[in-house]
Structures are given as structure tokens and as C-alpha cells.
Amino acid sequence: MPDLLIELFSEEIPARMQGMARDELRKRVTDGLVEAGLTYASAGAFSTPRRLVLAVEELTAESRPVREERKGPNTSAPAAALEGFLRSTGLTVDQLEKRADKKGEVWFAVIERPGRTAAEIVAEVLEATIRNFPWPKSMRWGAGSLRWVRPLHSILCILSDEGGASVVPLTVEGIAAGNSTEGHRFMAPGRFAVSSFEDYAARLRRARVMLDQGEREAAIWSQAQNLAFAQGLEVVEDKGLLAEVAGLVEWPVPLMGRIGEDFLGLPPEVLQTSMKEHQKFFSVKNPKTGRIEGFVTVANIETPDHGATILKGNQKVLAARLSDARFFWENDLRVARAGMGEWAEGLKSVTFHNKLGSQADRVERIAALAREIAPLVGADAGDAERAARIAKLDLRSSMVGEFPELQGTMGRYYALEALKSDPPRPPSEPAPGLTRGLGEAEGGPGSSPGRGGNPIADAARDHYSPLGPSDAVPTEPVSVAVALADKLDTLTGFWAIDEKPTGSKDPFALRRAALGVIRLVLGNGVRGLELYHTFAIGWNAHTIPGFWAKIAAGNASLKAGKVPPPEPIDMEWITRRNAVIADLVSFFYDRLKVYLRDQGVRHDVIDACLSLPGADDLTLLVKRATALSDTLKTEDGANLIQGFKRANNILTQAEQKDGVEYSFGADPTYAEGPEERALFRALDEAEARIGPAMQAEDFPAAMAAMAALRAPIDAFFTAVQINTDNATVRRNRLNLLHRIRAVCSGVADLSRIEG
């Protein structure tokens, strides 16, 4: 069985496209081979900046002959139907057969396809793959019509076995397949022939090309760590940058340099971001101070001076980049130390959304909502409001304008700089100004920000979190309040203007915002954040002009002993609000189900708990659902569901048949056997345990009491006939079934449990 080797050699492929290209090449070629009747043992795809490679082992030498019979139209069918059948089969009328069928005489086509050699099939599949390759961006060059990510120079395509290697006959836009390739552009120019994948990989290595992406990543990381360790430093891990750099070089040569003293005062995040985004440098930090003091660049060539000239050029370019960053930093500090009022004013001219106003409008809403949420998360209301007013100011800074990914991070630095001289403010005192009363700032330029410090300044950094499933959840109360307000305002705002996610489209990241709220609430055990009420407040803030001012005025009137006049009721507005909020709550619970599914809690378990009081409290809901989920995983819990459903079905059918509700009067004096009397006692005991446990929110205890009903319910159904001839006994037993349903429903709506 031959092995197949394919190489598509071109100008440099962008690093971000190489992973996708490897996967697509492997999938398209192997799928095409299998569809054409070939099999193979294994396939591996590789890439370097200048080549895509596929190696297929133990490919069958030829496909098997195929005989296919296809039933066609009736012989009396219109001519158009017959013509269509002939086109689909590629046959003529005289090649068809007439056969008897239960509906009459019909046409049959017998299609025989002889086996084809692997070379024929590979040529056909590879040409189709090249011509239809799904590059995110592609180009044409010269006079040809072929599109490729960069000009395609050569195609290597050989089949090799014990007898040697043969070139697959293939020509695409004038590029004929061959058995040769090129090594490193500078260190090993010129073409050379290969005879197998092993020969290919070995010759490439001698020609200064590491074929495997993973090997290049490992080499870069190992050598970079060694360079840093030799000077008592550490390389800052960045897996995304490592993968990108490995896609930029064929023969990685890491080199380490030092950052000039003039730039060491910049915040470490600025140094790291500038070097990564502009130069693709790895940051190197001093483990004792946490400062970024050096960098590692990865060259694509070995030089006689061991990279000294390359390093000198990189340091010169880096100095220019960091000079820009220092200018931004110093310019921003000037504004920050003046109180950041310039940025606050500037937010008025920044549109958040044309239907939702400016960023300044949004800040006002978030600040008011954060003040409302603060008591629920243990934060001071005044601190939460001021933190919200400061959190977005860095959007107007020069540094965030250059590096948007630093929003929040830079906001904390600027807040700390602005607030160093502000006197402490007594708790809950009304905010005297934008940046007054925040206490002494920790750290300073160039110091590590840590995760603690001034809680109001920290909120500027943390309020965007969590951004993704691996992002940490803020735990400091002020940060939690502002983060919740930010995300809740986003959700209610876009629902108010009917900009909801549809299918796979979610341009405003509303699913991520909902998941962020869920993780913030559950991660911090937030209680009392009632979804419907909170969304209603958000809706009001978006749809009622001056909503928060009216609330403040009303509170002031009440405090002064005056009852404000009632607002006129707009029923149409209220109806629309209720419908929109109900839709938003439904969307939110769908996100909760997705989140909990990953935690091992089924969606039907959530549905079973949603029908009970307190479902609007996420923390309470999840505690109850988790306890029910754990109970259902036990034998007693799983069997109880069957007993409950049996009782519920019998009771429901009887009520429908009799036209009455059996919900009162189950009397143990009418119990006829020990099993029936035992069930009465078990229900009494369960009620006595479940009520207090649910009141104390001890859901595992409540679930255990409910699960304990499994044995007496099973024994009852085994020994007792519900629909007995004695009408009094039958009615009593149906009322007993109602007690089973009522007791279990006090814990969860078990009728919603599937299976």
C-alpha cells in the first residue's frame, strides 16, 4: 500500500490562517479519497510559513469496481422525466432496462464503474481541493484564474512504496506536480528531490526547516526560557503569541534583549501589549519585582554574529514604539491628575449606540443601577456609584485609543494617579465629585497592579469581567456591583430596542453579558437580585426620560413627608414592558441552562425548580437545582420519579374522568392494609421534615426527605388497587395520591423531569 505526500509551496501564509489551512487540507483530501473508494491508515497535516503539507499512510492502491442499480420513472412517464433520469445516470435509453414493478413497468439503470488507480483519484481530489480551498482571504496573480492565499509556486505530490516513488500526474494553472521542494529561503536556497515523507522531513531539517508547528513552539519556548533563566529573569507565558510566532518562522532562533531604562517606568501591561502587538516580542520580567525588563524576539535565520545585528535593529524599532507609548502615558497622566474631567466631558460625544445614547448617558445609567445593586453584594452605595462613573473614563485616553485591549487596566492606573491626594470619605457620604474621597492610591507607575488595593479604582479594571469562560470572576463588592450594572444595562438596553441575538448572530455579545451576570451572581453568592424587578428598573431607565432623577425626587418628597402625585398609567407601555422583560427573563434562563449543563445539571431539573417561589433568585434557584440533580443521581431519587409520575398520572386521569379535584380529605382511618397506613405515616414525616428544611434553604435535607418516600410509595402501589369498587376507599386513595403530589411539589415540580 503506497503512502501519499502532498506539499503546496507558496509565498508566506499568514500565521493566523495556518491552523485552519492544515485542518481543511487534511479533511478535504481524505474525505475526497474515501468518497472515491480509497481507504487509508492515518493522515497528518503540517505547515510552515511557506508550505502546507499532508502525509497519508497506507493508502489503497486502487478503488474497487462499483455496480449500482437505480430505479427510474415508469415507462409510461412523460419524456421529460426520462430525460432527467438519463442525465442523472449519464446513460442513453438503449442502456436502460425495463423491469416489472407493482406499479407497472419501470426503467432501471445499471451503472458499472471500474476501479481506478490511486494516482487518478489523488489527482482529481487534490485539484478540486486547490481550486476550492476556503481561505479567509485569497488573491490572484499573473494571468491565471487560480486564487490562493499567496502566489502558489509548486506542488509536490508523490506516491511511494517499497518499489520507489512516483509523481502523481497533475497540473493546476500551469503548475505541474513534481517530487521536489525548497528548504529555508536564506540558509538553504535551491530545490531538492524527495522520495517519501521520512526523506522529505529529514531533508527539510538539514535545509533548516522545522516542519511541525508543535516542534517549533516547543523549541521557541525552551530556548526563550533558557535565555531568560541565564539572566535571572522569567518569560511571561503567552500561548497565543507562541502559536503566532511559530507560524512566522521556519527555523526559530530566539534572541533576548533588554528594555531601555527610560521605558521601565511604563506600566508592565503597556510594555507587554506594545511589544506583543507591534513587534511580536515575548515579555521578560524580573520575578523579584514583577517589572518587565526585557524581551525575546524570534529570528528566522542564524547569523555569524549570533543575532547581534538583528537584536540591535529590533531594539531600535522597539525604542521608537515605546517612545510613542511613553508619550501616550505621560499625556494621559496629565489629564488623570487633573481629575479626568476632560475625559468625562469627552464621553458625551462618543456614541454607544444610536438608539441608546452616548457613553456618558450609559455611565449615568450604570452608576444609578450600581448604587441600587450595591447593598445586595455588600458594597457601599456611594463607592459603587463613583466607581461606575470612573470605570469608562479611560475610553477617552490616548493609550486605550492605541491599545483597546487595555481598557479597564489603564482605567485603574489613571484612577490611582488621579486619586492619590484625595482625602478619605466617610461611608455612604454623597459623592463630592468625580474623583474625590477614594483614599490613598497604592503603587504607582511601573509597579505591579496586583489584585487588591483601592476598591473603587480596581472596579475600573474588573468591571468588564468575566469576559469568557476562563476569565476570573471579580469578588470585591464594588467591582461586582459595577460589573453587574454594566451587563444588566447592556441586556435591558438592547432588548428595549429589539436588538436580540438571532441564531448564531450576536453582534453585541448579549449571550456573553448574560453568562457574565450568571457567573457574577453564582460566584459571589449574591442574594436578592430578583431578575424581573432588576430588568424592569433597567427598562425604565432606558425608556423613561430622567427616570433616576424622578426616583430621587420622589424619595426626597417622601422623606419630607409629602406624597408625590401619581404618574398617569400608560397600559400600552406597561404591556409592552412586561412582554419584553418576560422575553429577556426567558433568554436569561436559557443561558442559565446552558451554563449549568456544563456543570452537570440537566435542563429539565432547572425547569422543575423554576415553578417554585424564589426562582427569581438565581443563587437560591441553583442551590435547589443542584440538590435535586444530586438526588436524581441516587437510586431512591430515580425510582421516586417513577412512583411520583405513576401517582400523578392516575390522579390526573381520575380527575378528568370524574370532573372533580381530589385534593382534600385523605383519612388514615380508611386505610385497609399495612402498606397504605405506612404511606400515610411516611407522608406525615416527610411534610414535617420538608417544610422546615425548605424554609432554612437546606435543600439537600428536603430532597433526602422526599427521596425517602420511594420505598413506601413502591410498596403502596404493589399492594393496593387505587380504583377499587368501594367509592369511599377509592376517593380516599385518590386524595392520598394528591398528598404525594403536593408533598413532592413543595420541593420541585417533578412532572417536568424527563424519563
Image (cartoon, rainbow, N blue to C red):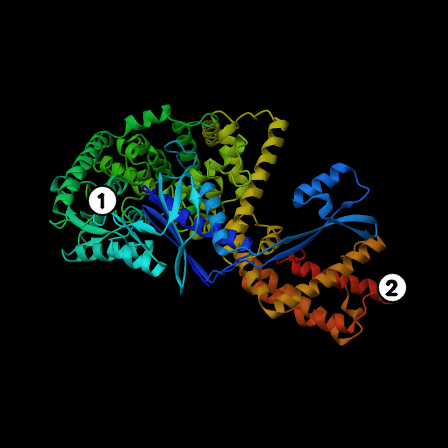
Quadrant occupied by the C terminus = bottom right
Please tell me whether mark 2 sits on a helix, a strand or a loop.
helix
* Residue 43 image label: none
* Quarter-of-image position of residue 465: top left
Please tell me whether mark 1 sits on a helix, a strand or a loop.
helix
| Amino acid beneath label 1 | Pro
Query: Which of the pair 297/100 is nearer the observer?
Result: 100
Q: Count neighbours of disc 1 (C-alpha within 10 A) and say few if under 14, some if 14 to 19, many if 20 or more.
A: many
* Quarter-of-image position of residue 363: top left
Residue located at (74% from left, 41% from top): 82
Which x, y percent locates residue 138?
40, 37
**In the visual, does 225 lie left or right of 528?**
left
Which x, y percent locates residue 458?
31, 43
**In the visual, does 386 lie left or right of 61?**
left
* Quarter-of-image position of residue 44: bottom left
| Amino acid beneath label 2 | Ala
Q: Residue furthest front?
A: 94
Which x, y percent locates residue 246?
29, 50
* Residue 268 image label: 1
Whether residue 55 appears in this view of the structure is no
Residue located at (21% from left, 46% from top): 186
Whether residue 627 appears in this view of the structure is yes
Q: How many marks?
A: 2
Query: Which of the pair 735/220 is nearer the observer?
Result: 220
**Which residue is the site of mark 2?**
727
Which of the marked residues, 1 or 2, is nearer the chain's N terminus? 1
**In the visual, does 479 lie left or right of 719?**
left
Residues at circles 1 and 2 in contact by the CB criterion of under 8 Å: no
Nearest-to-viewer mark from 1 and 2: 1
Q: Count neighbours of disc 2 (C-alpha within 10 A) and say few if under 14, some if 14 to 19, many if 20 or more.
A: few
